[in-house]
Structure formats: C-alpha cells, structure tokens
Image: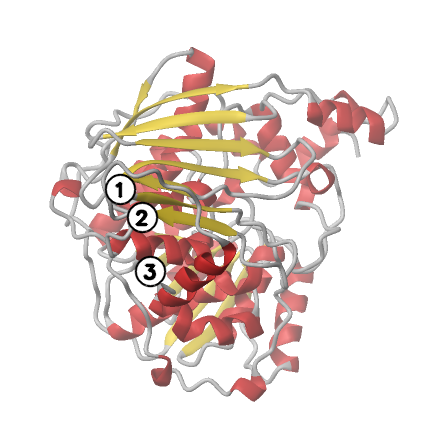
Amino acid sequence: MNRREFLKASAWTAGLSAFAPGCASRPAETGFGGRGAPMQGFRCGPIDTVRVAFAGVGGRGTSAMYRIAQIPGCRVVAICDLRQSRMDVCNGWLAKNGFAKAREYVGPEAYKAMCDSPDVDVVYVAGSWQMHEMVGIYAVKAGKHTFVEVPAAMTLDGCWEFVEAAEKSKVHCMQLENCCYGEEELLALNLVRKGILGDPVYADCAYIHDLRYMSYSELEGEPGDHKRGYWQMWRLMWNAAHKGNQYPTHGLGPVCQYMNINRGDRMTELVSLETDPMQNEAYAKAMFPADDWRAKLKVEMGDMNMTTVRTAKGRLIHIKHDVTTPGPYGRINRIVCTRGLMQGASSMDREDAAFPYRVGWSDKIGEHVGYFSAEKAEEVRRKFRHPYFAAASDIAKKIGGHGGMDFMMDLRWVYCLRNGLPMDMDVYDLASWCSICELSERAVRERRMIEVPDFTRGGWRTAEPLGIVTVDMSRFGFDKDKLRGGTSQMNV
C-alpha cells in the first residue's frame, strides 16, 4: 500500500480537513450553541445495573471491555467497530468467560444506532483519536453517559461541543484519563490535599514514550502485545500533519487535580516551542526502502515539544511531549509546593520495579529541603497512601491494565454511577485539558502566547475541589478466584 492508497482507504480521510492547521474555530469566549445547566458537581440518579456499549474495539477498546465485564453491576450490551473481526474477538472472549454475547454494530456509521439504543446507559469511546469527537459528541447528544479515551477532543470546536452537549443533555461526560489513578499520582494528590507539601507553585509533567516502532507498524495485536502497531497507522498520519502537543493529558491531568484547575483555579494562557522534526524521518529512512511511502513521508511534529501554561493564581505548568527520541518512558509528575515537593518517575516498564518517586518537605520556613532517604520515602508512601489505592489496588493488579490504573479508573466511574455521585473528572476537565492540542499547535506555528478559554464560564471560582474519594469494595462482591487477567499493558 502506498500513501495515496492508504489515505483513500482510511475511514477518517473525509474529515481530515476539519483538523487542518489554521482551521477556523468558533469564538472561544462564548461557545457556539448556548449553554444548559452547569455540570460542576453534577450527579444523576443511581443506576443499579450499568449497561455499557463500546465504540471502537481495537486494542484499547477490547482491553476496556475485558475489565468492565468483570465489574459486578456492569453488563456489556453492545460493541461497535468498522471490522467484523473485532466483533468476533470480543464476543469470543465474552462467551469463553461465561458472559452473555453483546449486540454487534459494524460499519462507519453503525455507532449511531448503538448510541440511540434505549437499553444503553453508557457509551465507552475508544478507537483512534480522529473518531473520539465524532462518536463521543453524538453519544452525549443521544443522552448517554459518555466516557472517552484520551485525547477526547483534538480541536477547540470539539471541546466546546462536548461541553454544551453535556450541559443540555444533563449526562456525565468524562475523559478516561487513567494516569490520575496511578499509585504515585494518588499519593501526590493525597499529600497536597492534606497540606503536607504546602500550596502548589508549579508542576512539571510529560508524555515521553518512544513510539516509532508502533507508529510505523501495520501490525495489529491484542492488548498487552508491545509489538503491535496502530490500525492503518492513524497516529503516524496525525503527527505527520500537526505540530504542538497532541497528547498532553497523561501528564497534565494529575497535576491539574493537584492544583484544583477548574475548581478554584484555571489555565489562562500558554506558550509553546518545539525542536525540528528529525527522528521520525530518520527512523523511516533507515527502516524502509527508499521507494516506500513511509520513507518519503514528511512529518510536521517536532521531536520534543515544550508547552508552559500559566494559571489565574499565577502558577505554572510545564508540559513535555516526545514520542520519537530513544529513551525510557516517563511522565515526570513533579509538583513543587511552598513547603516541599514530590517527583515521580512514572516508569512502569517492570511490574516488580521499586516504587519510583522522590519526596521531601520541611515544616520550617526557609529551611533547605532535600529529598528524603529511600527508607523515609517508603514510610511516607505507607503513611499517606491514598485510601482508594489501599482499597482497590489488590483487585486492580489482578485484572490489570497499565499496572491496574485502568481498572481503578473504571471501577471508580462505575461506583459513581451506581451510587449517584459526581465524577472525579467532568466535561470541563475534558475540554480544558484537551484544548492544549490545538492551542499548543497555534502557539508553535504563530510564535506567540495563546489564551486558554474558560470552558466553565466562571464556574471555576466556586466549584468544589476534588476530595479524597474512594469506593466501598464490599458493595461490589468481587470473587477473587474468578478474576481474569489479560490486560497487562504497562505503558500508557
């Protein structure tokens, strides 16, 4: 397949122009559809049995289905994809493991009938980035609680439409930012909430992950297979057309929670710079024949993007993005406060690795602060372990998914739905975190500071911060002997 044939065959080619650099956006100050009820603290009536439909069941969607099928009080009722082969994989797994088969929806617009189905409570949107806005917004408008993989929106228009659709439909709309449920991220959140580190001043975060092999691979594998690639190389084609940070939320989401972004503070402006693009093209020329379209493909995205965001309270967030240079995976996760700091390596290449974080603080103003010894850091870890991690991590590690954080995320939103509670992340978090995709690209191309819209329209001033939340595991009734693993992905 050459590049022209690839583009012709891709299901999303027709909509590619909507994401082109310089695409006009509706006014960020006002949105474009009028607003319904504000969604901060939104809760709905308890749902006893949560009926879940999955849109996009490639690697991520399939692994999500494996996890959610095993949560008591959840039922997988429908699956949707462009390929019948994915239906066969998913329903084969359900039947083999004693679950009822799900209804199948196959085809480019089959998701619409699935979202419109009256026996669906939740639509879980996976698949490629290019489908997240299209499917997710349709699901919200159809009145379904909608949970969307990252990034949920690639454009400001998409961010605003998610917000206004959720406000009008009065349904939950949450981005599935699983890194907010990692052990070190939950620990850092607990330390900040308890005031141990003082008030946040700035944070460093990142998505650093060498994805060259997967980006240029035509292979598609199952969850946990690190030799797989992206179907039709959709991630490579997106990065070839865009600059800026197109995958910011794994690092950004947790530090926004530490800083109460959208709940007492908000992001107001950003600047963004990046290196020249070199590594992708060098890799392709070394790996493929000179007449292969991949060896000729010009890539827009720089090897390293650095975006700095300022908040209304005068804090800074530094975000790095690098998916091409050689080196270990990392999210940095460094939060610096008035009394101390914590930094995590966020490296999950090995399940048995020592807990990779550093922490230090002082109760005395002006005293030098260094990192604690390994022994003291381990003491901090045990003493300030987040109660949710303490409650659910054993089962999460059995079922898996990036060391268990995927399951921790899913279990929490299911618990909130079943008990009529607000979500830990709302549609305003989805919009503001994802807005970095388009805004950072504008900043790079236009070489200027860019304002960040206030998607809450002032609601951030009075919204309650995310508390120290957990789940009552006794209300689920897990049978630990029947838990099935198989979603062993270790890097996000």
The residue at 41%/59% (across/down) is 115
Q: Quadrant of the N terminus?
A: top right
User: Which residue: 86% across, 22% down?
Assistant: 291
Residue 419 spot, x, y in % from top left: 26, 74
Residue 257: numbered disc: 2
| Horizontal arrangement in the rendering, residue 139 relative to residue 160 (left or right) | right
Which residue is denoted by mark 1 in the rendering? Answer: 261
Ranked by sequence position, the earlier of labels 3 and 2 is: 3
Amino acid type, callout 1: Ile
Q: Is residue 155 left or right of residue 374?
A: left
Secondary structure at badge 3 equals strand
Who is closer to the viewer here, 460 or 265? Answer: 265
Give, as a three-letter code, the residue at label 3: His
Q: Which dot, 3 or 2, sits closer to the camera?
A: 2
**Residue 230 at x, y = what percent?**
66, 45
- What secondary structure is marked by label 2? helix
Q: Which residue is mark 3?
A: 145
Q: Is residue 121 visible?
A: no
Q: Residues within 10 Å of mark 3 (few under 14, many from 20)?
A: many
Asked whether 15 or 54 is in front, the reply is: 54
The type of residue carrying mark 2 is: Gln
Above or below: residue 75 compared with residue 219: below
